[in-house]
Each structure stands twice: as structure tokens, then as C-alpha cells.
């Protein structure tokens, strides 16, 4: 039972981390480059994107799961289950990734950007060859933090029909008054978080220059 629940949690976390990274990175880049004084300053677009990100981040995850039930059912054909839980998990993580990417890019040395522009680099070339490579360690650190948060979110998702370790903890540990199950799940979650952080730190060391 625990092995199956662990697999479901890993599936939810890995897929939602991947989807949120794919969607959140472009959003974060747009927030960074359209900010005041940046290479593609656009106050209107920046304000719209910031509003959308802040609005999504302000909704508690449990409420977000309930609000998104119709959309989740449209995308996956069901509002219950491990696959269905990936939808709200991804949506909850996208604005977090976006803000992490935005912050990482805004911390890149402006002198490096100006040097690239002086050599005739286009906006796209500055983004792909300067901003992303320079900010990559910080971006990976942020995505690692996102994955750690998603482990906690997945436990909440399991409590309301998402499966995984959260479901086992509530059904067999809490409702079944089995402290051994609860203790085992806590240990597994701690190991997952530590393992995720370790992998993230190793990747950061590889890409740091």
C-alpha cells in the first residue's frame, strides 16, 4: 500500500513540477524583461502578468482544487485521482516558478547584458545566451524549492481524493487510528524532501560557472 502511494506521489510531483516549469519559465522571463528599465520594458503587459500571477498565488491550494474541479474534469475526464490532481498542482506551482525565474533573471549583472547589447545581440539572443545561462543556478534552486512545496501540496491533494501518501495518511492513519502508518508516511515524506533537495544541490553545482 505504501509503495503504491509513494509511486502516486512521485508521479504527481514529477509531472506537476515539469509542467509548471515549462509554463512558469516563459512567464517569469516575460515578467523580468518587461519590467521598468529592462531590455523589453512594457509596463502594461508587466502589470497584467503580475496581476494574474499574484491572483493565482493568493488562492489557498485547497480552495484552488475545489474551484478548478470543472476545468480538471474537462482536461482529464475526472476530478478525482492521481492524474486529476496534477492539474491544480501545476496551476498552483506555475506562478511560484514564474516569480522565482523573474527574481533570478533580475539579479543578473546589468553590465553583462549591456556588453551583449553592445556587441549587437538581439533581445532573443540576450535572453537565450545571457540571461538564462547566468540565472540558471538560481532558477534550478527555485525549481527545487517548488518541487519540495509540491510534495506538501500532493499530501493535501491526497486528503481530498488525489491519492498518494496523503490519502493513505488520512484514511488508514488518521481515520483508522494507526499511528504506525502516520509515522511511516512522515518518514517517507522527510526522505523525499531531503532527496529532492540533494538532487537539486548537485545539479546547481554542475551548472554553476
Image (cartoon, helix red, strand yellow):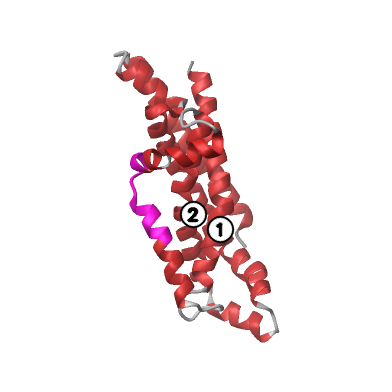
Mark linked to residue 154? none
Q: Residue furthest right?
A: 120
Residue 177 lies within the magenta run: no
Q: In x, y percent, where is residue 110?
A: 54, 78
Mark linked to residue 97? 2
Residue at screen point 48% across, 35% down: 85
Q: Is residue 83 above or below residue 203?
A: above
Q: Which secondary structure is most common in the magenta stretch?
A: helix
Q: In x, y percent, where is residue 37?
A: 48, 81
Secondary structure type for disc 1: helix
Q: Is residue 82 left or right of residue 50?
A: right
- The magenta segment is 52-63
Residue highlighted by disc 1: 25
Residue 57 lies within the magenta run: yes
Say if mark 1 contacts mark 2, CB within 8 Å.
Answer: yes
For residue 123, what is the image quadrant?
Answer: bottom right
Amino acid at each position: 500500500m505504501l509503495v503504491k502511494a509513494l509511486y502516486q506521489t512521485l508521479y504527481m510531483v514529477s509531472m506537476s513540477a515539469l509542467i509548471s516549469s515549462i509554463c512558469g519559465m516563459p512567464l517569469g522571463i516575460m515578467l523580468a524583461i518587461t519590467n521598468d528599465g529592462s531590455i523589453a520594458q512594457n509596463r502594461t503587459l508587466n502589470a497584467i502578468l503580475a496581476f494574474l500571477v499574484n491572483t493565482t498565488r493568493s488562492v489557498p491550494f485547497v480552495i484552488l482544487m475545489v474551484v478548478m474541479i470543472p476545468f480538471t474534469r474537462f482536461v482529464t475526464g475526472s476530478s478525482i485521482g492521481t492524474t486529476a490532481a496534477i492539474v491544480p498542482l501545476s496551476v498552483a506551482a506555475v506562478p511560484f516558478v514564474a516569480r522565482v525565474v523573474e527574481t533570478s533573471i533580475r539579479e543578473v549583472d546589468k553590465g553583462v547584458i549591456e556588453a551583449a547589447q553592445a556587441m549587437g545581440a538581439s533581445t532573443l539572443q540576450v535572453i537565450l545566451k545571457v540571461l538564462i545561462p547566468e540565472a540558471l543556478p538560481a532558477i534550478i534552486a527555485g525549481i527545487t524549492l517548488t518541487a519540495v512545496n509540491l510534495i506538501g501540496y500532493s499530501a493535501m491533494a491526497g486528503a481530498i481524493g488525489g491519492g498518494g501518501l496523503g490519502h493513505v495518511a488520512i484514511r488508514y492513519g488518521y481515520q483508522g487510528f494507526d499511528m504506525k502508518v502516520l509515522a511511516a508516511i512522515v518518514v517517507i515524506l522527510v526522505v523525499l524532501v531531503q532527496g529532492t533537495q540533494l538532487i537539486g544541490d548537485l545539479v546547481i553545482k554542475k551548472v554553476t560557472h
